[in-house]
Amino acid sequence: MAHAHSVKRHKGLMDWLTTVDHKKIAILYLLAGGLFFGIGGIEAVLIRLQLIKPMNDFVSAQTFNELITMHGTTMIFLGVMPVIFALMNAVIPLQIGARDVAFPFLNSLGFWTFLFGGILLNLSWIMGGAPDAGWTAYTPLSTTTYSTTHGVDFYTVGLQIAGLGTLIGGINFLATIITMRAPGMSFMRMPMFTWTSFITSAMILFAFPAITVGLVLLSFDRILGANFFEVANGGNPVLWQHIFWIFGHPEVYILILPAFGVISEVIPTFARKRLFGYSSMVFATILIAFLGFMVWAHHMFTTGLGPVANALFSIATMLIAVPTGIKIFNWLFTMWGGQIRFTSPNLFAIGFIPTFVMGGVTGVMLASAPADFQFHDTYFVVAHFHYVIVGGLVSGLLSGLHYWWPKMFGRMLNESLGKLSFWFFIIGFHLTFFVQHFLGLMGMQRRVFTYLPNQGFDTLNMVSTIGAILMGIGILIFLINAIVTATKPKGVADDPWEDGRTLEWAIPSPPPEYNFKQIPLVRGIDALWKEKMAGNKGMTPAEPLGPIHMPSPTILPFVMSVGIFIAGLGFMFSKEQFSNSFMSLIFNNWIVVIIGLLITFGSMLLRSLYDDHGWHIEVDELDEEGVKA
Amino acid sequence: MSTADHQANHDVVKHSERHEGPQKHIIVFIFSIILTAIAFAAVSAGGVNAAFTVILLLVMAVLQVLVQLGYWMHLKDRGHLMPILFMIGGFFVAGTAIVTALYWVWW
């Protein structure tokens, strides 16, 4: 047996910086996403504290603008996206019976570019002011004429770098799901979470190029003096809105589809029934993705698109309620007649359904163009999108985290704390956002930093802020739960919920680094459940026991991302007037950019020239580890 | 397994049974050149009606793309369903955006 390739095993911090193991990258995504989610949450609480009473002066108008911009941007791009990627990384290779993702190196690169993009964006707080043009960065407000600090530059460059990571991740999961499914796992036997992640990845592939182009145009306008959005020189500011929403609307489906997937896993498990209407679920997911690309202009009804465009986009938008309704009914029918256990993941999943329906209903209301002229830019819109993103997506993610936590970390989260955090979260959530519908209908605009007393806004805003604090307590309880659990010893069963249906529950928790000692043979939908019902003790292997080929750990993705980060900073400040002559020398002559790009392209060159064939875990090592597991 | 991998790399499979040989590729190559030649000729001839030239160029371009994708990128062969689906998806998304922006929406 050739045993030529030995591998350098790293320990401690170096292990995390160099890992290409999807399970460890999942934990990195979770930590980084959790950190940014915390920052975005603090910004949210500050926003609500400012709005707790009329004419409040808790923060200034400028700070308020920065807070709302950073809250939206951070939560969407740096908070929930990475937590989605955390779940996808942790679960998908296990669910399809694979030993890793298709491109482990790219997986690591995607994480590090995301992290450095996020850090760059948040550096704006301490480097001369955060972006303040709203998370949509509409031109002309975001051009240098009206946004004079470097805030929006941090937005364009930071999101560009973070978006690179998302695009890389999306392509990686597409390739993984297409090429690495275990024998017997046809597309129509894939678990729903894998299906929705597959569709989400396809949407990332098609939607992210639009924001990439938009951010390039905007940063060229701002930094290099181009005129894409400058009316005086023949540019068109509405063009930005189109480009942003051609990306932005698919993006919200990119966010919600994995949550649909989580719910479709959790509800059957805890109802002890197979998912009702599996094939209609798949069909509905594809239809939502398809329609999601044809509705972007419903964000722009009031820009004057004309009646034809408004009508067509209205109808297209309302159509999305059909596949979404299919999903809702399928979940209800799955629970119907099941033996439901109200565990903490299931509570979040069951809480998701009515909450998401409410967000969907206001979505159909907003889809009606004439009514939208009334709702546009009011708190009604704020209530709507928080219902679908927080009540929907974040509930789904919390459900998924509680559900897969034992698989990711080998420890069960405390059930009592989990249920407590659920009740704080769901009550706080509805208290915060339900009243905002009425604030909007009464005429309170979004993005205003304060309001006059005695317009009927006072009590409802007070209620909303109290709700936000309760929701914050719910999240804090979850955090405490995670920390308390981390101190407990490992050692939960392979299938800790006892009713696991899919492949990830067939292997130890946490799984060994090669996941499956032998790739399993999939004999039907809900592969593990099928074996359980047939009275088998586990999966039937599809291959003999043999040495397992593993990818080598590498620091290159980290170094590449540092290079991009340096180049990004250099690009942002390339036209800055520095008082320090050394700074102007290195920044104004593009030296910083060149250094950054040299680091990145140098790493790429190194990666191309140095052949790394990976290494093998031999059969005898497998047996030793097998006993341990 | 690693030994097997290395061996597999060395004795690369030279001829599978279904391999078509170079004839088709030579024909396709000549066809591509003819398409290009027609396009150049149509422009350099000058006397032809401009609108007709534009349409002719577009037709030649579409044929060229199909030939390149089908033969040189192997999309006509088996096992390329996913790349085809995703390319159609990409064209659909980009096409929707462009057509809508040009013909539905007035600014």
Image (spheres, coloured by chain):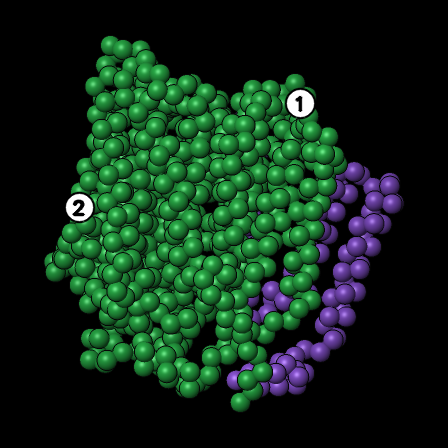
Chain colours: A green, B purple
Q: Which residue is label 1 attached to?
A: A234
Question: B43 or A270: nearer the eye?
Answer: A270
Q: Which mark is residue B63?
A: none
- A100 w.r.t. A155: above or below: below
Identify which residue is drawn at 27% across, 66% down: A490
> Which subunit holds the residue at mark 2?
A
Q: Residue at x 26, y 48 (%)?
A: A480
Residue A371 seen in the figure: no
Name the foreground residue: A550 vs A297: A550
Using the image, determine if residue A603 lies above or below residue B59: below
**Which one is closest to the eye, mark 2 or mark 1?**
2
Q: Chain of mark 1?
A: A
Q: How many labels, in total?
A: 2
Q: Give the image location of residue A248, x and y in percent.
A: 46, 38
Is A324 situated left or right of A551 in this image? Answer: left
Which mark identifies residue A420? Answer: 2
Inspect this view and state whether residue A419 appears: yes
Image location of residue A431, percent across then percent down: 21, 31
Mark 2 and mark 1 lie on one chain; the one further toward the N terminus is: 1
| Quarter containing the C terminus of chain A | bottom left
Residue name at image x 29 percent, y 57 percent: A486
Residue B100 horizontal/vertical position (percent): 53, 35
Side of A68 relative to A263 (left or right) = right
SS assignment at label 1: loop
In the rendered structure, which amino acid carries the disc numbered 2? Answer: Leu
- Please tell me which residue is depicted at 38% across the width and 37% down the height of the picture: A40
Residue A274 is situated, as x and y percent measured from the top left of the image, at: 22, 63
Q: Label 1 sits on what residue type?
A: Gly
